[in-house]
Amino acid sequence: MARASVSRAAFHKWLRAGAILAFAMLAFLQASTARALPIFARQTGQSCVACHAGGQFPELTPYGRMFKLTGYTLGERTIPIAAMAVGDLSQTRVNNDASGNPINPKNGLPIFDFASIFLAGKITDKIGAFAQFTYTNYDHQNGVTNEWEGHWGSDNTDFRFVDRIIGEANDFILGVTLHNNPTVQDVWNSAPAWGYPYISSTISPVAKIPQLPVIEGSLASQVAGLGAYMYWNKTVYAELTGYSTADGIWSFMSHGNKAGDPAHPQTYLRGYNPYARIALTRDWGPHSAMLGAFFLNVNIYPNDANQFPIFTQGVTRYRDYGMDAQYQYLLEPHTITAQARYVRENIHDPNNLVFSDSTSGNLDSLRLKASYVYQARYGVSLSFFNTTGSPDSTAYSASANFHPNTQGWTPEIFWIPNQRVRIGIQYTHYTKFLGATSNYDGTGRNARDNDTLFIYLWAASW
């Protein structure tokens, strides 16, 4: 069957549609953003650029990291509510599969994608919080009528109790964190929860890397993590956290996920699962650098065909070892940021709950990203991603050679017309997808056929 590809005329059509979407939403949001700042800016009296590098949220500056490490308590208590919304369109390069069925159901069409409400800020001088609740407009299609359904759910959540002890020679920050996503408590954008891409297509099934280590998103809004951390002399950061299933009294942290829900099943962990983090940091002049390492060990129960947990067949153990680094140059009008992360995941599956060809395997993920922003307004980014791993005919059945290997590049340009709005164009180009450059699925589909153009408007208000 003949395949459609991106033509120049089609590209201009999408660009015009994206511009209409962007400026319509911008006009709608200007009334609410012009007179008020989001929560933390109101609380501290600082502009968004003080916390976000070049205004590129969610990248944090040294001041933004200190604000988070001290429990969101700097400044004065204020109205603890804010909101954000995203409108976008995405276009898959070849949008028909081998049977002629569309891959991206909203291909080239502008959509209202998702919106979030935030409850966050200072509670007491030592207690603060960040809680996000997100509505996804095109979450999934009803299995009976095939109509689209929206979904409300818990998103990034982080509660903190912090004390700071400052002496003649020492500056200690000691904190306790309760959160619902491994590394959401982290303050560096090389960590998975806040890593690049900061925004991408939610509706196209080929717009994201198909296989990643569990620390890179599988447990988001599924777990409850209780941990303690320290930051000494703005030089050494160390943290220990334990994770368990976010059910019972912790179910508010996984709201929107439940056992038996085919669209949003609950993930169940066995017992308490450790996470450790260490980082060395240095700030000098306009420069800031970090070098770190982390480790996560989780034991996950399988779900049955109806998405209910099976507690009688054992667990699959995932051990993730990671190293990351970040550099920032912050001196107006220039902002340069770079992040790097490597994760090695060892999977032990003695009961063949995930694998069928072996009882063990591995997955490796590399992410590199660099950005430049001029005058906190005009920005460019370039990212490289590479995932490799051991083959398995069940875990990676969508691959003709049963490999997870996926590689590619993501360039992006963006414009920040004011500190609470970002408009961007992003393109994800795959040089390899699920183990091959060409015919990766055995039906003639090539890696580059999944290339995705993504145009977005991202705005925050209140």
Image: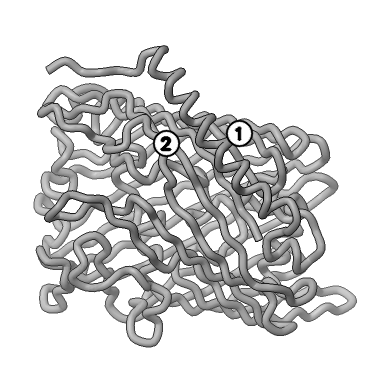
Residue pointed to by mark 1: 414
> What residue lies at 70% left-to-right and 56% top-to-bottom?
281
Q: Secondary structure at mark 1?
A: strand
Q: Would residue 224 be found to the left or right of residue 400 on screen?
A: right
Q: Provide residue 383's location: percent of width, then percent of height.
A: 51, 34
Q: Earlier in the sequence, mark 2 or mark 1?
A: 2
Residue 237 appears in the figure: yes
Q: Secondary structure at mark 2?
A: loop
Residue that mark 2 sits on: 110
* Whether residue 58 is visible: no
In this view of the protein, which residue sits in the foreground, 36 or 62? Answer: 36
Can you say which quadrant of the picture contains the N terminus?
A: top left
**Image x and y of residue 28, in percent:** 60, 46
The image shows residue 302, relative to residue 63, as above or below, that is below
Label 1 is placed on what type of residue?
Answer: Phe
Q: Taking 196 as reference, is 303 above or below it? A: below
State the residue at coordinates (16%, 15%): 2
Looking at the picture, tell me which residue is in the foreground, 21 or 402.
Answer: 21
